[in-house]
Structures are given as structure tokens and as C-alpha cells.
Image (cartoon, rainbow, N blue to C red):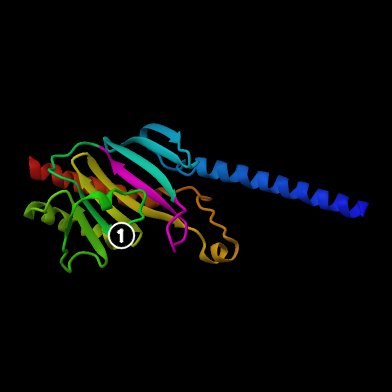
Amino acid sequence: MLWLAIALGGGLVWLALRLQREDKARRVARKSWLDRIALDNDRRIVAASGFPRASGEREGVTVDLQAVPDMLSYRKLPALWLLVTLPESLPLRQRLNLMIRPSGTEAFSHFGELPHQTHLPDSFPPHAALRSEEPLDPDEAALLARHLALFADPRVKELVVSPKGLRITWLAEEANRGRYLLFRDAEIGREALDPASLDPLLTHLHALRRDILEAAA
């Protein structure tokens, strides 16, 4: 019995140390998730989730990057969302949110708070929904139509166009289905964000911003 107690105690100590090491590695990986991303005049903080938020400049325009874990979506895998924002004022009259497959549980979005929903033509992506503060005018509809190529990337979830700036919400990662179903392993953010994933999103946002400014000139 003594040897059994010693073995059991040793096993518990080993398990505790292993969990401690895994927790430390998880915190380090999450904190450094944006480390490969270079911005001018870079400023960074770590959110309560353990993931970073970075602000800086690209092409002379302010950029804000935010990693948002989503562990609570009903009947969906845990996910990590990247919010790519150009938070500079634009000459627009209202906020427009174009989202793919909205469920009403998107904690990262104010989509459901906008009062007006527009029936979209077939030229828009399948399963897309558009909400706004007021009915769209022809110029706003044409603006969105010119930039639908953004949604050729199936990981793009939402485009926000507003007087306060522009935002793309992009699915950076989903938990492994097999490990999650079997072991409830919902770990995300083990690998740092690849700059090659961010660059096309910024390219789309910069093009949209130029389009808006040129139309208002």
C-alpha cells in the first residue's frame, strides 16, 4: 500500500507539473501570436484572453489588429478570429455590415444591432446578409459591389464599412474537430499568424478606402 501511495502521489505531481508547463507554453504562444507582423510605430497590449492587440501604420494609414477567441458558439468549433481594422474617419453617411452566415452569436460584431436589412441580389456571395442604419442608396450599393472579391476567401466572415473606418473579420483558426469531439481539446493560437495571411486583407481594405476617398473628392 505504501508503494501504491508513493506511485500515486508521484503520478499526481508529474501531472501537475505537466499541466503547469502546458499552461505556460499556452500563455507564451498566445501572447506572441502577432509577433511576426510588422507595423510602423507599433504599439501592443495583451488582452484578458491572453491574445495580443497591435496598433500601428501601414502605407501611412493606421491599422489595428485584434485576436478574438470564440469558445462559446453553439454547435460550432472553438475559433480564433482576426479583426483587421483601419480606424480612420471616412466621408460616409452610415454604417454597413456585410456578413456571411450570421448566427446572432457573433460576439465580435454589432451586426444584429443594425435595424435595416437589405435583400441582396445573386451577385453577392451565397449566404451573405447586409444590415445598415438606413436603407442603402445607389452609391453605397455600388461601392459594396465593387469590392465583393474580398469574399472569394472563404475565411472572410464580415466586412464593416462605416464613418469611423473599415474592418474585415477573418477566421484565423478553428479547433481540430477530432481532438475537440474526443478530448474537448479546444486549444487555438499555437502558431503565430503568418504575415502572408494578413497582407491580402490589408490590400483589400486599402483599396476600399481609396475608392471611398476618391468618390468623395
Amino acid type assigned to the residue bearing label 1 in the image: Pro
Residue at image coords 23%, 41% = 165
Residue at position x 20%, y 54% in the image: 131
**Residue picked out by circle 1:** 102
Q: Secondary structure at mark 1?
A: loop
Give the residue displayed 66% in from the left and 44% down from the top. Answer: 21
Position of residue 10 measured from the top left corner of the image (x, y, whole percent): 82, 49
Is residue 79 on the magenta stretch?
Answer: yes
Can see residue 204?
A: no
Quadrant into which the N terminus falls: bottom right
Q: Quadrant of the C terminus?
A: top left
The quadrant where residue 23 appears: top right
Q: Is residue 154 above or below residue 143?
A: below
The span shown in magenta is 70-87
Q: How many marks?
A: 1
Quick check: 25 left or right of 37? right
* Nearer to the camera, 99 or 39: 99
Q: Is residue 31 above or below residue 186?
A: above
How would you rate the neighbour count of disc 1 (Cα within 10 Å): few for under 14, some for 14-19, many for 20 or more? some
Q: Quadrant of residue 86?
A: top left
